[in-house]
Image (tube, rainbow, N blue to C red):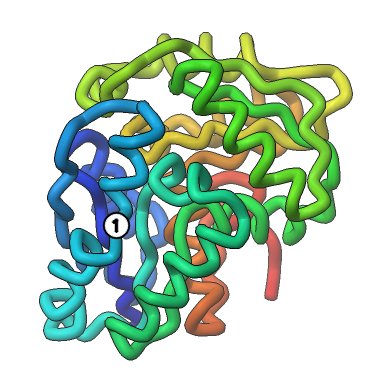
Amino acid sequence: MTAVGLLYPGHSAEDDYPRIEMLLDSDVRLPLVHTDIGEDAHRLDALIEMGSAPRLAAGVEELRLAGAEAVVWACTSGSFVLGWDGAHEQVRTLALTAGLPASSTSFAFAHAVRELGATRVAIAATYPQDVAAYFTDFLKSSDIEVVAARGSGIITAAEVGTWGRDEVMALARAGDHPDAEVVLLPDTALHTAQHIPELEEVLGKPVLTANQVTVWEGLRLVERRVRGPKLGTLFSRRA
């Protein structure tokens, strides 16, 4: 059995992770600990505090006791707002605290885009436009070209967590761009796990979503590759 530990802020779309376990249909387990979200706001100061070292450290011991072999901070905005260097420091501190390999959803996106051999992406974000711009800057630091970035102006993760299939599809369509090789949906508060094959069919290209790439990143950390075609192109590639 492979266990990837997840630190997830608050309560929004955490039920995507048991669904991903089911869709992978393997011996992968995803123990999850909810971190203290503080103020639920897609705003710079709130996001920085959400991903602070003490808030992340509080959940580490529970994941270790659950047998986690790696830990991923399952939050995109709470990592990329720190910038490339700040996000590296965040996961370095997390790794030292946990005594385990560590990463975050922001790095998961950068690594997954490379895995697909892509260089040009479009961002379809739930966030306000100014927060989405931080993600654009983060990806550019990884030599990824962002050809379009659309924000939706949603302030709270709680609201994002209420979105269903129709809203997810509309978001992806609105954020796509003809020059993009891949479309990114970066919010872990958004329920996407069950929609990925349909998203890829509708857009005609790979789609990367936050909870999907978070799991993939954790498996990458422990050098485990699992195929799961129901989770889209990223999980359909052979070892």
- Above or below for 2 versus 48: below
Query: In the image, what residue type sits under mark 1?
Result: Ser
The residue closer to the viewer here, 182 or 187, is: 187
Residue 150 is situated, as x and y percent measured from the top left of the image, at 61, 16
Residue at far bottom of view? 99
Q: Quadrant of the N terminus?
A: bottom left
- Above or below for 44 versus 105: above
Q: Quadrant of the C terminus?
A: bottom right
Specify whether 25 is left or right of 7.
right
- Quarter-of-image position of residue 178: top right
Residue pictured at 88% horizontal, 24% vertical: 179
Report crowding for label 1: few under 14, some 14 to 19, many 20 or more residues within 10 A (C-alpha). some
- Above or below for 150 versus 89: above
> What secondary structure is marked by label 1?
loop
Residue 69 is situated, as x and y percent measured from the top left of the image, at 34, 85
Residue pictured at 21% horizontal, 34% vertical: 12
The answer to whether one can see residue 1 in this image is no
The answer to whether one can see residue 126 in this image is yes
Residue 231 is situated, as x and y percent measured from the top left of the image, at 51, 47
Residue 91 is situated, as x and y percent measured from the top left of the image, at 44, 69
How many discs appear?
Answer: 1
Residue pictured at 57% horizontal, 58% vertical: 107
- Quarter-of-image position of residue 6: bottom left
The residue closer to the viewer here, 82 or 117, is: 82
Question: Mark 1 sits on what residue?
Answer: 52
